[in-house]
Amino acid sequence: MQRRYNQLGSGVKMAAYSRSQLLLLLMSVCLCGLGSVLGLKPASGPAEPPNPPVLRAADLPVRDAPAAAAAAAAGASQPRRATGWKLSEEEACREDLTRLCPRQTWTNNLAVLECLQDRREETEIAPDCNHLLWNYKLNLTTDPKFESVATEVCKSTIAEIKECNEEERGRGYLVSCLVDHRGNITEYQCNQYITKMTSIIFSDYRLICGFMDKCKEDINNLRCGSINVGHKDVHSQGEVIACLEKALVRQAEQQDHVRSIKEECQRAILRVAELSSDDFHLDRHLYFSCRDDRERFCQNTQAGEGKVYKCLFNHKFEEAMSEKCRDALTTRQKLISQDYRVSYSLAKACKLDLRKQRCSLDTNLPRAREARLSYLLLCLEAAVHRGRPVSGECQGEMLDYRRMLMEDFSLSPEIVLHCRTEIEAHCSGLHRKGRTLHCLMRIGRSDRSTAIDSICQSALQTLIQSADPGADYRIDRALNEACESVIQTACKHIRTGDPMILSCLMEHLYTEKMVEDCEHRLLELQYFISRDWKLDPILYKKCQGDAARLCHTHGWNETSELMPPGAVFSCLYRHAYRTEEQGRRLSRDCKVEVQRILHQRALDVKLDPELQKRCMTDLGKWCSEKTDTGQELECLQDHLEDLVSTCRDVVGNLTELESEVRDEKPGESNPVCLTCNFMSPFLSHCWLQDIQIDALLIRACDPAIQAHCHDVADNQIDTGDLMECLIQNKHQKEMNDKCSVGVTHFQLIQMKDFRFSYKFKMACKEDVLRLCPNIKKKVDVVICLSTTVRNDTLQDAKEQRVSLKCRKQLRVEELEMSEDIRLDPELYDPCKSDIGRLCPNVNFGNAQMIECLKEQKKQLSQRCHQRIFRLQEGEMTDPELDYQLMRVCKQMIKRFCTEADARNVLQCLKQNKNSELMDPKCKQMITKRQITQNTDYRLNPVLRKACLADIPKFCQSILNKASEDSELEGQVIACLKLKYADQRLSSDCEDQIRVILQESALDYRLDPQLQMHCSDEISRLCAEEAAAQEQTGQVEECLKVNLLKIKQETCKKEVLNMLKESKADIFVDPVLHTACALDIKHHCAAITPGRGRQMSCLMEALQDKRIRLQPECKKRLQDRIDMWSYAAKVAPAEGFSDLAVQVMTSPSKNYILLMIALSVCILFLVGLLCGRITKQVMRELKDR
């Protein structure tokens, strides 16, 4: 073709100008033309002659009759004109020129050419003028003389560019080569010349060297236009290239390539796009489509270096942007996604960085892959994340194009190809500003009914990795716009663009500062970030060394089948809470970041990939109605026993690592073994171990934390101390309902498995394996260990089988269980019906429900009664487990019992019960516990130990009749009281019974037998005294005084027993003791208390006329004597032993014994006398 045109123009000769003049002419033309079009000033030097001779008319190649006639007419006079041939003088273009171009451009052929070829519509220029312009441009690009001009202007540049220096001369290839390498041209004059030639070449695809040869077949197949000269011979053939570009991007978005573009044409299309990347004028289709939009949005943006492109890209989704321009821009962006070099600014800014980071030297990848925008971004992002230097200019360009990928899903051919169905079904009409991607993200994290295809999910994950919005939230325009107000208020202290912005937003999720739209966009993005640990830049930065050391990971943009991205975080967590003995621990910085991620994942079950994957069925089955914040996870934990095995494993292991429960396996360092372990349903987070991980609970409990737990809350890595503190302060005034409910749920979940309590597990793991094997439920483990501790204590074992650290933590767990009956399933389950029947309006917390059941003990069902009895038995053995006692008497314990042993706290409180400083509420609680203790000797561990030998000796018949779990209603203690009166008990047992007698003498309620048998009589005879509740023995005194009026024999017998007991010791008769206190001090101070000695002393003093007792004492003593006399008549001795006991315990014991002795002596004397008389009579009879 070139030869054809050369032959056509060879009949006309150019004037003989010197080479230097021609060089000067072209330089001037180029400079002038550039100044007129781009607004640039020509370089200093020779000015353009008034009429520069560019080409004579005879030099104009002519191809058809109209043009030939015009050329002939022009050629007749042209040689005689000194000013040379000009386009403006041609008849074919004169009318168009006059109408369309300013007069000052007429003297410059290139300025005229630019003016005419930049018209919007083809019909604006006459066909003859179009053809004339085409031939002129073609001649410029192929004429050897112009090539020689290029050789002179660009001599040094050609020598530097090896490819251009080797091009064959005379075929027009040199100019095209210089155009290809114009980015490397530093010589000013050469650069200006090539710039002008570029504008000419890119006005028509047929002028681009080699393009027709490579794409001829594809143009015809795709019907993108004609390359046959004369068929459609218009000067602006940009539509042909645009058609090919659209076909190229459409091919990437289709699975079945019906009309596949040849590889060499694909490269030619991308090369053309690359060469037109610096000046949007060179992309003819985009130029004509966006000319008005450029004036509207980018009027002040200077052309060149791709600046206009970037400006238009930034305004692509503006409402005022025309659809035609938006489509052209989208096509250009799609080409950039296929080859980053189509972006002039990106290729230029990152050229050195690409070379430095070796992003184009991967021999395992095809060349086309290395040119993809995603590959460039991943490679350079990997360098940034590894801390390698990447220029700020390059990072700025990367940020722009990462944002571009997030804004428009269509720029990712994989998304268009694999997510087409989902987009059409759910996301139509949401094309702009990243809404489509967020729509896909939304359905990607939804349930199975609307879940996206796995291939689409993978495409989304890949796109998000390429865009890397985790590094800068501004990349995600939809998120940025939705969360702008939240960022301005909640995260204003963080630098704009900092990766911590996303963490800040997550921390304020579900708070008052969060807005709904931001919440949705944030969770949609976090859903995908959570599935690849590398997408959190802070986590990657802090943990990349640990991941490589412990998890055998590779580079940021590399994946391994042995260690997929989703398994790396499980690996990191696996090593996060290891002890120093276990070794292979995370660095502190990495551990902090792992915990931060756990905090975020606890906010939403869908942020935990493994949990969502394995529990989808159970979520639908059990938790379909639990859609509020945090309810899904709570629901799964509540239904732990009902879940399918795979889901149960995941939920069940939320709080502990398998490696912490059993010994490390050999070969664990093997990557294959690691992968198997990590991909198993391990915990993806550990919010039960670390309360801070449950961000919702943290927010609800913030007042309580600030008031009571701020010290432990400040720890970066919590080991359960914060939750333990909240449990201990669960009922403080700062604890609101939300926090209380959350803490209680936390406790309830812990009860399902002892491993769920991190501190308990770590403290007692070895003890559990040794003493309680095969027991899983926490409550059973606690019972097993506490029983072992109790048995060792009661048996005075030399060495406790439960370790000290476990015993300490066991105490904490037991205290927690005592606060809420629901935390003790062994108690709660059998008492459910009783709770609904007897305590329907009582709250569970604060041990209120347990206290209610204790008070209603007689009305409980048998199973519940047995469980309550066992509970009380444990509380009496260890008062610290009595939550209500410890809560109500907390201050009194500090006042009176700071030095007392924990197991003797109740004993200490009883001793100080009647102190003036004793709090009334605490005193009332102590009385309740005393009443409970006196119902059964087994509930009084001190008495049980002191009377260990006496009880089976004197009260075995009572024990034989009672069952193991039934209460004895004070029968054993009543039996011991009687033996105390008979002075038959051991000294230790006697001391304890004396205390019980003294206490019950002051408060009749402490005598269960008396209360049971005399309740009606008390109501009838002593109602006033009972109502006073002064606990000074007035009710007992009332019963004694009204002994004759008592109708019920059982009650009368109890009162008589009281009288009998009071004879044994005056201290068990508080009324008499109070009345006679001064007399005891004056007359019986030297008498040792006990065994009725002081009572005998007072009785002797009463009979001694020389001693004057206090009137009240004398009166009370006389009343007691009358009562004892009546008791002796009403209840005579039942046998000789009983009689002997009564005599020995009588205040008149000495008198009675003297009388008995005298009687014996008299009988002896009488017997002796009678014997002698009888002997004498017998002798007399014999003598007879």
Image (cartoon, helix red, strand yellow):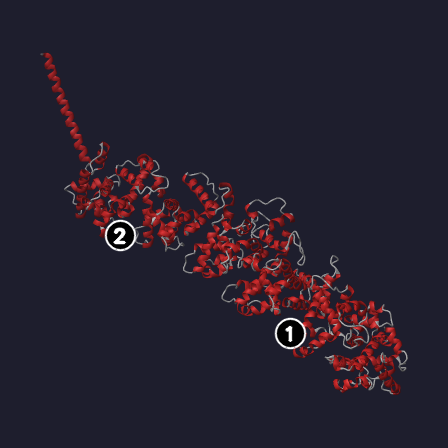
The residue singled out by tag 1 in the image is 315
Would residue 287 be found to the left or right of residue 881 on screen? right
Q: Is residue 866 above or below residue 374?
A: above
Mark 1 lies on a secondary structure that is loop
* Tag nearer the camera, 2 or 1: 1
What is the CA distance from the residue labelled 2 to the residue labelled 1?
Answer: 86 Å
Please say whether residue 144 is visible from this viewpoint.
no
Residue 414 appears in which quarter of the rendering?
bottom right
* Residue under the point 77% across and 84% down: 96
Residue 964 x, y percent position in the rendering:
37, 39
Residue 951 x, y percent position in the rendering:
33, 37
Residue 875 x, y percent position in the rendering:
39, 46
- Mark 2 crowd level (few <14, some 14–19, many ≥20, 10 Å Cα): some
Please say whether residue 598 is visible from this viewpoint.
yes
Residue 572 x, y percent position in the rendering:
60, 53
The residue singled out by tag 2 in the image is 1029
Query: Reading the chain from its start, which is encountered first: label 2 or label 1?
Result: 1
Which amino acid type is marked by label 2? Gln
Which amino acid type is marked by label 1? His
Residue 1153 appears in which quarter of the rendering?
top left
Quadrant placement of the C terminus: top left
Closest to the observer: 508 or 966?
966
Mark 2 lies on a secondary structure that is loop
Closest to the observer: 688 or 267?
267
